[in-house]
Image (tube, rainbow, N blue to C red):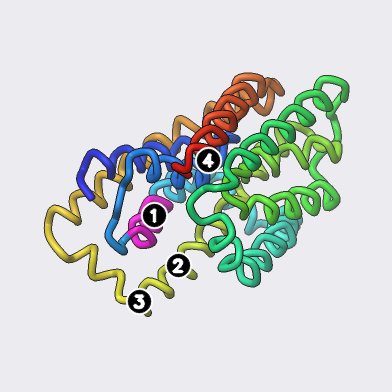
Amino acid sequence: MNIFYAVLLGLVQGLTEFLPVSSSGHLVLIQKIFNIDLGGADMFFDLTLHIGTLFSVCVLLRRQIISLFKPPFKKLLYLILATIPAAVAGVFLGDAIDKIFFGGAYLAGSFALTAAILTAAQSFAKRSKNICPLRLVHAGCMGLAQAIAVIPGISRSGTTVAAGIISGGNRGDVAEFSFLMSIPVIAGGFVVSLYKIIRGGGVAFAVSSPYAAVCIAAGVAVSAISGFFAIKIMKKAITSARYTPFIVYLLVLAAICGTLSFAGIL
């Protein structure tokens, strides 16, 4: 690990966590392309990067977060229910998914699937008046979509937004709720991963040297800053229902991953 790779991975994490292009898929791909070997500290460093994105979404949505805990608590209930599918998938399928998708062999298909999901959402949004405020059915559909997105290469933000729009939710409400949904998922993943890391002794990486601590701090800072920009960009994309740049990018990325896989690199 060096500071260049720390900043690079922080930038990738911050941008792709909220843009509909899959942060997990990009992190796997970047580490493969640049042959980044974190020497057993990969889980801990990845964990710290999520702290940056969690910070950015909490700051930008601080008012919405506070309003969750005010009567009648309807949106808080929606958020809890929408989080359950992803939590169940992560607990019972997380290890199996990590084994199956380790190395990025299936990234091409996952990126292509995300592109297809965004295409469907964009088409539906342009044909729909999209005036229905967020309801339980929309939150439920978004929760199920978020569970599917535990697969690397399938975008969490892209699938949840698409599910909310296709189920008839208002684009503004869907955008806000999708960002709120990321908070318990990131926080829950942080707690679970931290427990695994402590059991495995991986935290020693953070205090192994002052340079390691600087790398971590740089990665977290870049992740947080780029996360701010990603959220603002995604808000505009959702409200305008313009996903074409992301769709094209994902299709190109899928083609690249397919080529790398055929060449034996992935």
Q: In this view, does 42 lie to the left or right of 98?
A: left
Residue at 74% across, 37% down = 162
Q: Earlier in the sequence, mark 4 or mark 2?
A: 2
Residue beneath label 1, please?
46
Identify which residue, 118 or 235, lies in the foreground.
118
Residue at 82% across, 20% down = 126
Residue beneath label 2, please?
193
* Magenta segment includes 46: yes
Badge 1 marks a residue whose secondary structure is helix
Q: Which span is picked out in magenta?
A: 42-50
| Amino acid type, mark 3 | Gly
| Amino acid type, mark 1 | Asp
| Amino acid type, mark 4 | Ser
Identify which residue, 115 or 128, lies in the foreground.
115
Q: What number is the disc on residue 54?
A: none
| Amino acid type, mark 2 | Ser
Q: Which of marks 4 and 2 is in front?
A: 4
Q: In which quarter of the image is residue 250?
A: top right
Residue beneath label 3, please?
200
Question: How far across and how far down the image is residue 196, in percent?
Answer: 43, 74
Q: Is residue 71 at least partly visible in the picture?
A: no
